[in-house]
Amino acid sequence: MNFRLDINGLRAIAVIAVVFFHFNANWLSGGFAGVDVFFVISGYLMTGIILKGLEKNSFSVWRFYMARARRIIPALAAMILVLLCLGWFYLAPGDYAILSNHTASSINFISNVVFWQESGYFDAAAHEKWLLHTWSLSVEWQFYLIYPLILVPLHALIGGNKLKLTILLGAVIGFVFCSFATLYWPNPSFYLLPTRAWELLLGGVAFIYPLKFKAIHQNIIVLFGVCLILISYTAFSESFSWPGYYSLVPVFGTFLVMWANKSNSIITNNYVFQKVGDASYSIYLWHWPVVVAINYLGKQNDLMTVFIGLFISFVFGFFSYHQIEKRCAKLSHRKGNILVIFLFCLIVLTSLVIKSNNGVKDRVDESYFKITKNLVMPTRANGYCFYSFLVSDEKVGKTEGTQCLLGNKSASPSTVLFGDSFGGHFDPFWDEIFKVNKQSLTSITTNWCHPSLTDSFPGPKSNPAFEQCLINRKFVVNNISHYKNIIIAGSWRNLYTDGYFKEVLDFITFAAKSGTNVIIMPSPTIYDTNVLKRFESSLFNSNFNFDLTEMPKSKDELAIQVNSLLSEYASNYSNVFYLKRSDIFATSDSFMIDGITIPYSLDGGHITLDGSINSAKYFMKNSAKYEVVSELLK
């Protein structure tokens, strides 16, 4: 296939958008759509390779697979091996074990499935995953595997013309399915091939139905197509359901630019875009680990560090392109195939060894594990009540999620703790307090289930936590009169920004008017980075200087404001009590174990199991509000 300069320019437009979005989403709020541009390009190129081979009766599925492997694996493997080597020196065992799992899934091109099962692409936790960006490579590879296996027999059965119509029909049906699926299953729809295949197929449509346009019409079509792409980059954001029908904007824009087939357009065929387009794959590979490294250091809000990271990404990308991609492309097919198989086996075996040795835990002494053992989220698995559908495979049920006791379990519960994961992380806190007061409480908490009288849900409704949440809410509303006290907690800041805060206030009003005492827990300090990982890194490697006061927390400004709103609202009722941060957390936002200062924070939002216990100790020892709470429990 002849080299298309316009397509090479499109690669640059795609990778620049993705890189800028990942380094700072405020620069290009919809820059993630650059991946959709890449998908359309890949679909065009792969359709061309397969159909031209079929027309010449020279297409080989095996040669097609190996050609893709020689193109993709060497640069990917080099990046992975560098991460594994650096991880040995800088990643704590837990993080190193996670990295090894992700390296194995990435080189096997199933990382999109793994990351789908772990979290959402736009979640804060995503910035802790060194190989998250390989999800798109996995989607493309899965398409490469399946596509020829469908086209080859269809070409033999129905011929070339009907095959082209089938591809067009597949793109249309795929778009309809994608639009529907994204509404009901947003997380899997983002990551998995079935909802992305139409984008690649539409690229194929651009190849199989070429049109010749006059030069003036070519210019108009290219300009309109690029405008659609730029609109998606600037007008869309993480809040949009993606891919869904919104993705038609960048996808159709890319389709138009390729359809116009204008090789000398200054928009796509300029020196900068051609050079960036050449190295776009390697730039894409290297930019994300740099983003994660900056986040690891807690420097994602430092503009100078971000600019340096951008520079490093492009330098590494160009180096990888010239020293790995171009060199491997010059190898004979035989040598290239041997290299690919060797790199694949090396990474798989290395990943298995690291994972089987729990991140090579021998690199640290036992004191590390003693300190970090309970720096986790309290769940059913470690003796508490938070019913997490993200940590383990729980079952939705009326009793499973609503009948868990804490404190003195032999006593009859007169208090209920109700909320989402920000309620669940307070399980150890209240467990300690109720044990001291010889009382028990029922803890009813699950993912995303904020206190509300409605069926709204800020998480994915496809997750079983939604069904459990409806059960939890119904139980609390129907039984609130049986409880003397209700303790509520939630991700107040996020609920405020996502438009659910009024529901929380309505629930407080409902509970207060029912005659039940209401205790409102505050949001802990919200950091911009995963505090615990920074702390664990400092334990593992002395080169990491952990200073909690230097951890960025721009998000906390709004959290403080929302805490104040709850405090003010509580003052409207004599039976509503708000606990301030200063009541339950030390001003240092940390506690001491064996002479070591440990942050309360788990992931920058939640607090750890040990943090929750120690905050209870602080509350009972230092806060006057504890006497008020003790009276309520009698």
Image (cartoon, rainbow, N blue to C red):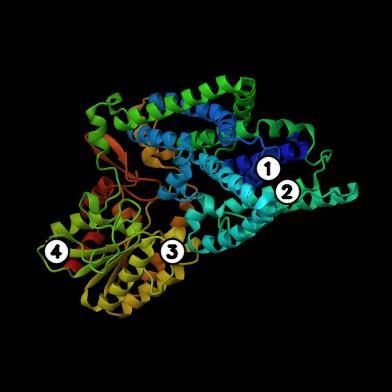
215, above or below 500, in the image: above
Q: Given the current orientation, which residue lies at the most extreme front position?
A: 157
Tags 2 and 4 touching, CB below 8 Å: no
Quadrant containing the C terminus in the rendered view? bottom left
- For marks 2 and 4, the one nearer the N-term is 2
Q: Amino acid at mark 1?
A: Leu
Query: Where's residue 316, x and y in %?
Result: 59, 26
Please tell me the numbered disc located at residue 51.
1
Residue located 45% across and 62% down the image: 458
Please tell me the numbered disc located at residue 63.
none
Tags 4 and 3 touching, CB below 8 Å: no
Figure quadrant of residue 575: bottom left
Tags 1 and 2 touching, CB below 8 Å: yes
Q: Amino acid at mark 4?
A: Gln
Q: Which residue is mark 4?
A: 439
- Which is more toward the observer, 472 or 173? 173
Foreground mark, 1 or 4, reads: 1
- Which is more toward the observer, 612 or 92? 92
Foreground mark, 2 or 4, reads: 2
Foreground mark, 1 or 3, reads: 1
